[in-house]
Image (cartoon, helix red, strand yellow):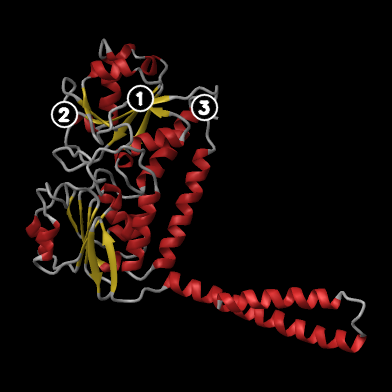
Amino acid sequence: MTFFLLFVTGRQGYIARTLSSDRVDNSHRDIFVTILKSVLTISALCAALAFAATAASAASTSYPLTIDNCGTKVTFQKAPERAIGLGQNSAEILLLLGLENKMVGTAFWPNKVLPQLAEANSKVKLLTVEFPTFESILSENPDFVTAALPTLMGPSSKVAKREDFEKFNIPTYVSPSICPAQGASQDKYGNAARSQIWNMSTLYQEIDELSQIFDVRDKGQALIADFKKREEALRANAPKDGKKLSYVFWFSSPSPSADAYVGGKNSPSGYIADLLGGRNAITTEAEWPTLGWESIIAANPDVIVVASLDRNRWELDKPEAKIKFLTTDPAVSQLAAVKNKAIVVMDGQAMNPTIRTIYGAEQVAQQLKALGLLK
């Protein structure tokens, strides 16, 4: 089809040049005009057919479908009908794709579901807001399991490894955002260090591949387009005085005296800082470094982002508890960010490589604008 279109385009140019020639009489002009109209009609038809073919390929999946996922080839004979989403991101992507009727369970929710997904989510069984057991997953007789974090499915996971599901002929999928780069060091939870800032490309890949697996690619493309538009809008933000703000993203701590779990340099937290025209004050490449407050004080961030978590595992999961500590601790309260009241609250799930990262960036941007720190 491509060759034919190129040929037609060339013929149009030839006819146009011929028509402009003074050597062609009126009878020949009429013939050429007729030919030109026919060529244009055929060109339009070919273009329409090409567009239709593209639209069809975006909206329909041909099975069997094989996807290379984190180095593992996974084949689907048909769209899954009993899916389980391990991790909030996996579950929310499936819900955003309108697949609640194809889901039989979810697990591990640091935050409450997005408000617009609450009704759809209520139709899906919640296994637990924490880590599920392998047995509880199998009891739902799933025909597909997708996981958002290595702690939920991976070599060091206490829940399950991919090969555990393979023994039961259950296809699995792991978020591309957590696939470790070759040679990358990993922490005890399986989180790999990043040499470059995480970005949304792997998330878009995840949405696209899941939409292919379930044969709803049109919905996947629409979702990706929406996120790209919002990402572009966020990049338009800039510090009000032109200064590149530095950020610390505090996820949680077991206690005030314990080290803090913070977002690493190239983690989604670093991506949010970069997206808003700033930088992460934490320079370690580990995904989830734990730092003493002496190190955080030395980093001296312009902005402290405190995570809000609904899991209530620790008292400092609550943003109110974090802010109370920041403003009352004799040493930490002397930080410029604390003195300037540059403390903002963000859903903790945004610090994972997830769809909530964009939502979190929007939360931070809105509060910083109110504080006069962003335009």
- Residue 13: x, y in percent? 75, 73
Q: Which residue is mark 2?
A: 254
The numbered mark, 1 or 3, whose residue comes first in the sequence reads 3
- Helix, strand or loop at label 1? It is loop
On screen, residue 307 versus residue 153, left or right, reads right
Horizontal side, residue 139 vs residue 183: left or right: left
Residue 174 picture quarter:
bottom left
Classify residue 29 as left or right of residue 335.
right
Badge 2: residue crowd in 10 Å (few <14, some 14–19, many ≥20): some
Question: What mark, if any, has residue 320 been given in the picture?
Answer: none
Q: Position of residue 184 (x, y in %)?
A: 23, 41
The quadrant of the image that shows the C terminus is: top right
Q: Which residue is mark 1?
A: 281
Residue 123 against residue 191 in the figure, above or below = below
Where does residue 244 sit, x and y in percent of width and height?
47, 25
Q: Which residue is mark 3?
A: 239
Residue that appears at 33% across and 59% down: 95
What percent of the width, then of the height, locates residue 72? 21, 60
Mark 3 residue crowding within 10 angstroms, few (<14) / some (14–19) / many (20+): some
Does label 2 or label 3 sit earlier along the sequence? 3
Residue mark closest to the camera, 1 vs 3:
1
Eyeballing the image, is 173 above or below 44? above
Mark 2 to mark 3: distance in Å? Answer: 33 Å
In-front residue for pair 176/196: 196
- Give the amino acid type for the residue marked by disc 2 in the picture: Pro
